[in-house]
Image (cartoon, helix red, strand yellow):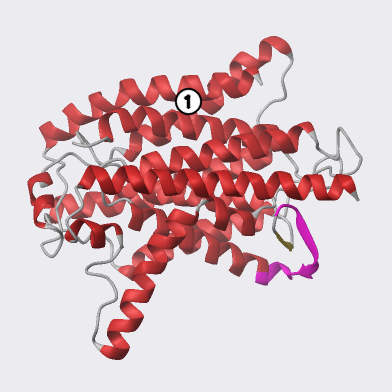
Amino acid sequence: MRQILFAGGIALAVSILLTPVLIKAFSRQGFGQEIRVEGPESHQAKRGTPTMGGVAIIIGLWAGYWGSHLIGIGYDADGPSASGLLVLGLTTILGAVGFLDDFIKIRKQRNLGLNKTAKLVGQLVAAVVFGVLALQFRGESGLTPGSLHLSYVRDITTVTMGSVVFILFVYLLVSAWSNAVNLTDGLDGLAAGSMTLVLGAYTVITFWQYRNACETNPGKGCYDVRDPLDLALICAAAAGACIGFLWWNAAPAKIFMGDTGSLALGGLLAGLSITTRTELLMVVVGALFVAEAASVVIQVAVFRSSRRRVFRMAPFHHHFELGGWAETTVIIRFWLLAAIASAVGLALFYSEYLAVVGD
C-alpha cells in the first residue's frame, strides 16, 4: 500500500512542478496549439496555447513508477515486473507517436499533423510489439502478462484466441482506446480529469487483485493476473501525473496535453485492460471515452448515408457547447459521467467477486 501512495505522490509532484517549466519553454519556442476553424467560435481564443503537455504526464508516470520501486527497496518490496514495463513501454511509444503528430502540427502551423496512415502505422507497431511480448515472460505460476482468452473481470475460458488473432485484438484495443481518449481531449481538463477517475478506479481494482491473487492467496474468487501490484503502481502514478497536469490544464487551460498525452493515455488504458484481464470491464469504466468515440462514428455514418447530422458537432461534447452550455458546465458534467461510469465498473467488479465467492 505504501508503494502505491509513493507512486501517486511522486508522480503528482513531478507533474505539477514540471508542467509550468514546459509552459514557459514551449511558449518561448512558439509551440502553440492550432484550433479547428469549424469548431466552436469560443475556442479560437485558445489559439497559441502551449501544447505537448503530455510530456509532463509521461515523465511523471515514469518518475512515480521508478521512484516507488527505489523507495520500496528499503522494505524488500518486489522490483519492476514484465507487465508493468510492457504497459509503460506501450504508453511511451504511443506518446512518441503523439509527440511527432503535435510537432508536425506546430511546424506546419495547421491542425493536422501525421496523416491517418502514418498514425495507424505507429499504433500498429506499438500494438504488435506489445502483443507479441505480452505472451512471453511466464512467471513462477506460468502466467504471462497477456492472455489468449477474452476477459470481463477475469478470463472467459470459453472464448479463446490464437496468437495471431490475439495480436489483431490488441491492435483493435490500442487503436480504439488511443483514438477515444484523443477525441475526448477537446475541452480544458476534460480528458485529464476523466482519466484521473478511471485510473483511480483501476488502482482499486488492481490492488484488490493483488490482495486476492491466486499465486499468493489461492482460493475462491482469486485472480490469475501476473503482476497486479506493479500494475497498481502504474495506475496510481498515472492518476497522480494526470492530477498534477490538471492543475495547469483546468479551464482556462495554460497548456494542452496534445496528442502526446491523449494517445499515450489511451494506450495506457488498452495495456491495463489486457494485463489485468478486464478488457470488457474497461468499456464500462471508460464509458465516457467510448461514448465520445461512438458519437463520431455515428455522426460520420449517418451523414454519409443521409447527409444529415445527429449532433450539431462531434465529438458530442461540442454538441452541448453549440447548444449553449458553458464550457465549464460541459466539463464538470462529463466528469460526473466519468465518475458514475467508474463507480458502476467498480460495483460490477466487486459484485462478480461476491458471486464467485458465494458459489
Q: Is residue 264 left or right of residue 20?
A: right
Q: Is residue 267 visible?
A: yes
Q: Is residue 164 magenta?
A: yes
Where are the magenta residues, as a range?
153-165
As drawn, is 327 to the left or to the right of 165? left
| Residue 125 position (above or below residue 64) | below
Q: Residue at x 74, y 70 (%)?
A: 162
Question: Is 58 above or below relative to 170?
Answer: above
Residue 192: percent from left, percent from top: 37, 40
Query: Is the residue 73 above or below the residue 273 in the image?
Result: above
The reply, left or right, for residue 3 in relation to residue 354 is left
Q: Position of residue 188 (x, y in %)?
A: 25, 42
| Amino acid of disc 1 | Ala
At 62% from the left edge and 38% from the top edge, which residue is drawn? 84
Front one among 104 and 326? 326
Q: Is residue 234 magenta?
A: no
Name the residue tied to disc 1.
Answer: 63
Residue at x 66% of width, y 66% of height: 166
Kind of element beneath mark 1: helix
Q: Residue furthest bottom?
A: 306
Q: Looking at the image, which residue sits at the far front?
A: 324
Q: Quadrant of residue 112?
A: bottom left
Local packing at callout 1 (Cα closer than 10 Å; few below 14, some 14-19, many 20+) is: many
Q: Is residue 52 above or below residue 239?
A: below
Q: Pick the quarter of the image with the N terminus.
A: top right
Image position, residue 350 (x, y; %): 71, 44
Could you tell me if residue 90 is visible in this image?
no
Q: Nearer the viewer, residue 248 or 294?
A: 294
In-front residue for pair 335/215 = 335
